[in-house]
Image (spheres, coloured by chain):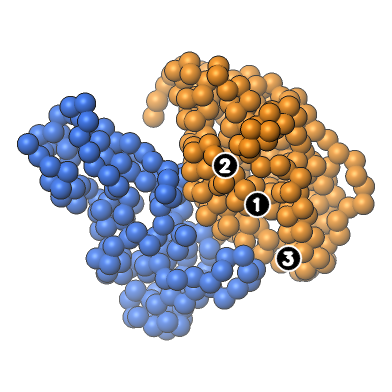
Amino acid sequence: MVTAADIRSYLEEVSDPEIPVLTITDLGVVQQIYFQDQTWFVELTPTYSGCPAMQQIEADILVKLQEKGIANSKVKHILSPAWTTDWISEEGRQKLRLYGIAPPVNEPDKSALFSEPPRVACPKCNSEDTRMVSLFGSTACKAQYQCNQCLEPFDYFKCLK
Amino acid sequence: MQQPALFEYVLRIADDSLILGQRLGEWCGHGPILEEDIAMTNIALDLIGQSISLYDFAAELEGTGKNHDQLAYLRYENEYKNILLVEQPNGDFAMTILRQFFFDAFRLPFYEALMKSPVAQLAAVAAKSVKETRYHLKHTSEWVIRMGDGTDESHQRAQDAIDHLWRYTNELFYENEVDQTLQAEGKVPALSAIRTQWLSTVTNVLSEATLQIPTNDWKFDGGREGRHSEHMGYILSDLQYMQRAYPNMEW
C-alpha cells in the first residue's frame, strides 16, 4: 500500500509546464494528500486565479500517478488559504535563479503609487543595479526587468502576498 | 434553488469579471506598446480566472448539474447581471484605463470586505483575488496620473474618458432586494461603506492627475436587473460563438 509520503515523492517528478525547472512541490501548490473512498486525493492551490498552467498540472498529476500504478486519483482545487510566493521552497528559489528568473523578494507596500520597484538582483551577474521594465510579464506571475550592468533582460517572479 | 439571492449575487461578481475580462482581451495584439498589451491581457486573465471560481460556486448553488462553462457561455443577455460600465467599448487607451481604474478602485475595498463573509466560498475567492486586484489598481492608478499630468493631449483624452464613463460609476453601488436579503443575513458587505472608500481613491488619484470629477450627476443603471446597453449583444455573440456553433465543445 502506498502512503501519502510516497505520493508526494511522485509529485516531485511533476514540473510546472511554464517554468519546467520547478516541480509542483517546489512551487508549494500541493497541499493535503489523502485516501478516501478507494481514491487518492491531491489538493492543489492555484497560484493566480487565471493561470492556464493549473489545468495542465492537474492532467500531469493524474498521468504521473497512473504511471506509478495508482489507478484511482483525483485532484481537488482549493482556494483557501490562498497561495503566496512565500510557499516557494528555498530549493525552488535557487532553481529559478539558475534558470534566469529572479525569485520573489520582499516588496514594498503596493498601495504606494510610483513607489520604488523592489530591488531585484540580476540572475546572470548578480548586480542589484536593475530596473523594472513592466509590472506585468510573460505569465501572470512575472514582471519584466533589465540589468543595467550586464544589460540582460530577465523575468522577475513577483511577490504575491 | 435553496439560496436564490446568493446565486444571483455570485453571478453578478462573476459576470462583471467575465465581461470586463472579455473586453480587455480585445486588446490582445492591439496594445499601444507591447508591455501594455501584455499587462491588459494579464489583467484579463486574472478576471476570467476569478469568474471561473465564482461560476463553479454559482453552479453548485443552482444545483442543476451545470458547469462553469455553461453558465459563462449559454445564458441569454437578460440573464447576465454585470453592470453597464464593464461592457462599454474599449475606446482609446485612456478610455480602457479609466474604465479599469473606476472598476479596480471599487473591487479592492469590495474584496477586502467580502473576505470577512461567513460564506466560505465567497471569502476564499475574495482572499485570492484581492492580491491580484492590488496589482491592477496600482497599475491603472499610475497610468491615470501619467496621462492626466502628461501632455495636453493625454490630459484631454483622460478627461474625456472620465466625463463619458462617470455616468456608469454609480451602478457599482446599485443595491436591490438581493443585497437587502444577504446583508440582513450578515453574508455580504453594505455597498455604501465601499462607496466612501472608492470615492476617496478616485478623488486622490484624479487630483494627483490634475483631472476633474464631473459635476454632472446623470447616471445609468439596469445591468444588475439584466437590462444592458446595445454593446452587450455584440460582446455575447463573440463570447458565445464557439459554444453556440459547436454545443458542448471542449478544448
Q: For mark 1, what is the residue?
A: B109
Residue type at mark 1 is Pro
* Residue at numbered disc 3: B145
Do residues under tags 2 and 3 come within 8 Å of each other at their CB atoms?
no
Closer to viewer: mark 2 or mark 1 = 2
Task: Spot the blue chain and give its letter.
Answer: A
Crowding at label 3, few (<14), some or many (≥20) Cα neighbours within 10 Å? many
Placement of B211 over or under B178, stated as above or below: below
Q: Residue at the spot x=34%, y=80% of the render?
A: A125
* Horizontal and vertical percent position of residue A96: 30, 65
| Image mark 2: chain | B
Question: Taking A65 as reference, is B32 above or below it?
Answer: below
> Which residue appears at 45% of the width and 63% of the height?
A159
Mark 1 belongs to chain: B
* 3 and 1 marks on the same chain: yes
Query: Residue B215, how many percent across, how many down?
Result: 92, 52
Quarter holding the N terminus of chain B is: top right
Q: Which residue is mark 2?
A: B117
In front of the other: label 3 or label 1?
A: 1
Residue B69 in view of the camera: no
